[in-house]
């Protein structure tokens, strides 16, 4: 979606985001300006929010504050620092102290999702049905994002201020949030299957991800389903969740549950070079910033590529200027900075050319830039491999391990010969369905998440401890990587009683970044 359209969309949807705090009767309405978006326009905005909200934590929890700023596509933003893909070399861009606070709020977007159903209904049952199904998944995506960051969240009573007069919603338990999301994903997939069975040409307008292709939406929904089942792996022995059974049922019935298994089906944001308003967000203004070497790639990421002689490093990274070439070792000039090191020293060392930075010729060689993946084929294969190792399902984990690596490398444009050479190395041979093999799978999953999928690399580290994250003097969180985000101050102001009840239930009344939420407790 181009930026002009985005501005129009914002103007159309602003009144919707404000309904929680102002009465329309109190507003002066311009009869020449639309205050209601069409289904097409609403869907486009909701999809944009799926990408934009992955970039950084936002405040304004039940107040309806919408997400602002599409930072998820920046290869040097706070999210990817927290994933330890890069190190911020100057305090202008932020710090590495891991002292974050508020989690993201999608409640403004959820109001627009509710409006989408209303507007779609006006189009008649046949045209409305695909909107309902896709919208149900988008709602699911929003709730999963918020609960994964904070824990219990308002869900069943959320967005009911205008319809039911509920302005202080209670907090649903995190387990109940996940169970409801599982139910919605099942329903969305079934609905889309039934729609296409009735009309193979059925579509939805305004879809910037798949151009209305409902089969691809089913693949995205079911891939997300697998992701969230695995994100709860610590709870695998809880019979009421039935994680193993759900995962196995999805894999055992590919006709009912199609998955993203090829890059062509990735749910990703694509940009183009021909339409200036839809260029890659960093192009061209950040060319100078990135080439000025103010931020370095992280050692947690670069060390993996170097140690495994991974050709992806030559594509995404530029060699460190001051490191000498070593005959027979093209990886010698690629070095990352430690996220935990002092920022002032990192800034000095970056400018001395001691660290690798982003390869401008790859990231910004064209106004089209690089797509941003939210759900992709590489992740699917690694999820399946992990499930096989954990005994959740049958299959060939080694093949999915290789297929996941191949999908990721092809995304970066690595040629077939280099992929074959990489996979043939002794270090890359799959160790078997054991702890070593699981570590291999999780490590490659981390590599595939580079500059994609929002906070998923951090979530996987939080769940598994793979890879080991850097902790040092820059860490201002007691030498620990946080386990969650806190609730916003607006929630304390507007929904204090329900918030305090949720905090007491979860953390004994505490609300810190180091509290352990339900999904992380054995």
Image (cartoon, grey):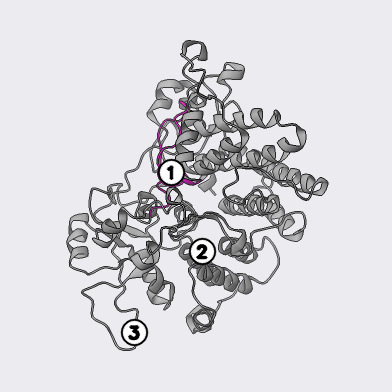
From where the camera sits, is residue 318 visible?
yes
- Residue 445 badge: 2
State the SS at label 2.
Answer: helix
In the displayed structure image, the side of residue 280 where residue 221 appears, left or right: right
Q: Is residue 65 magenta?
A: yes
Q: Residue furthest right?
A: 198
Residues at marks 2 and 3 touching, judged by CB atoms closer than 8 Å: no
Residues at marks 2 and 1 touching, judged by CB atoms closer than 8 Å: no
- Which residue has dot 3 on it? 329
Disc 1 crowd rating (10 Å Cα; few below 14, some 14-19, many 20+) is many
Task: Name the residue rendered at 52%, 25% in the picture.
Answer: 16
Pick the front one: 238 or 154: 154
- Which residue has dot 1 on it? 484
State the SS at label 3.
Answer: loop
x then y, percent, for residue 348: 17, 61
Task: Name the residue rendered at 61%, 29% in the picture.
Answer: 114
In the displayed structure image, the side of residue 439 where residue 398 appears, left or right: right
Q: Say which label, 2 or 3, has the lower sequence index.
A: 3
Q: Nearer the viewer, mark 2 or mark 3?
A: 3
In the image, residue 248 sits, relative to residue 109, either above or below, namely: below
x then y, percent, for residue 241: 66, 46
Q: Tell me where the magenta segment starts and ends, as one range.
A: 51-74
In the image, residue 283 sits, relative to residue 350, either above or below, namely: above
Pick the front one: 387 or 313: 313
Residues at marks 1 and 3 touching, judged by CB atoms closer than 8 Å: no
Q: Nearer the viewer, mark 1 or mark 3?
A: 3
Picture quadrant of residue 323: bottom left
In the displayed structure image, the side of residue 329 where residue 381 appears, left or right: right
State the SS at label 1.
Answer: loop
């Amino acid at each position: 979606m181009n930026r002009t359209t985005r501005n129009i969309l914002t103007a159309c949807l602003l009144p919707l985001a404000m309904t929680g705090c102002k009465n329309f009767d109190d507003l002066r309405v311009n009869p020449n300006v639309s205050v209601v978006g069409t289904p097409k326009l609403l869907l486009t905005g909701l999809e944009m929010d799926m990408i934009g909200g992955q970039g950084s934590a936002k405040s304004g929890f039940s107040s309806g504050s919408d997400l602002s700023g599409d930072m998820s596509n920046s290869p040097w933003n706070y999210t990817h620092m927290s994933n330890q893909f890069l190190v911020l070399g100057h305090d202008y861009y932020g710090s590495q102290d891991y002292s974050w606070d508020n989690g993201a709020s999608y409640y403004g977007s959820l109001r627009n999702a509710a409006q989408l159903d209303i507007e779609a209904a006006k189009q008649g049952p046949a045209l409305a049905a695909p909107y309902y199904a896709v919208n149900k998944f988008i709602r699911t995506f929003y709730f999963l994002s918020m609960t994964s960051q904070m824990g219990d969240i308002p869900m069943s009573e959320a967005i009911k201020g205008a319809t039911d007069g509920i302005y202080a919603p209670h907090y649903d338990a995190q387990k109940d949030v996940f169970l409801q999301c599982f139910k919605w994903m099942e329903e969305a997939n079934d609905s889309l299957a039934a729609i296409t069975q009735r009309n193979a040409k059925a579509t939805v307008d305004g879809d910037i991800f798949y151009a209305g292709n409902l089969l691809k939406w089913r693949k995205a929904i079911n891939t997300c389903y697998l992701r969230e089942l695995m994100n709860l792996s610590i709870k695998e022995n809880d019979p009421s969740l039935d994680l193993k059974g759900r995962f196995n049922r999805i894999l055992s019935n590919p006709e009912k549950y199609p998955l993203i298994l090829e890059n062509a089906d990735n749910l990703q944001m694509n940009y183009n070079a021909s339409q200036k308003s839809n260029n890659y967000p960093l192009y061209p203004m950040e060319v100078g910033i990135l080439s000025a070497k103010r931020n370095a790639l992280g050692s947690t990421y670069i060390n993996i590529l170097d140690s495994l002689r991974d050709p992806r490093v030559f594509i995404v990274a530029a060699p460190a200027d001051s490191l000498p070439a070593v005959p027979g070792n093209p990886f010698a000039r690629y070095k990352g900075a430690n996220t935990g090191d002092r920022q002032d020293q990192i800034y000095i060392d970056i400018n001395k050319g001691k660290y690798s930075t982003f390869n401008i010729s790859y990231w910004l060689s064209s106004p089209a830039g690089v797509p941003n993946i939210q759900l992709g084929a590489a992740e699917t294969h690694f999820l399946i491999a992990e499930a096989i190792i954990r005994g959740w399902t049958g299959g060939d984990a080694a093949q999915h391990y290789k297929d996941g690596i191949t999908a990721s490398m092809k995304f970066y444009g690595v040629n077939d010969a280099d992929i074959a050479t990489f996979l043939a190395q002794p270090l890359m041979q799959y160790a078997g369905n054991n702890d070593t093999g699981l570590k291999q799978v999780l490590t490659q999953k981390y590599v595939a998440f580079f500059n994609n999928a929002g906070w998923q690399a951090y979530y996987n580290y939080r769940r598994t401890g793979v890879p080991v994250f850097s902790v040092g003097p820059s860490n201002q969180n007691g030498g620990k990587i946080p386990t969650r985000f806190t609730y916003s101050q607006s929630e304390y102001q507007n929904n204090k009683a329900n918030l305090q009840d949720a905090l007491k239930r979860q953390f004994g009344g505490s609300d810190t970044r180091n509290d352990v939420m339900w999904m992380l407790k054995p």
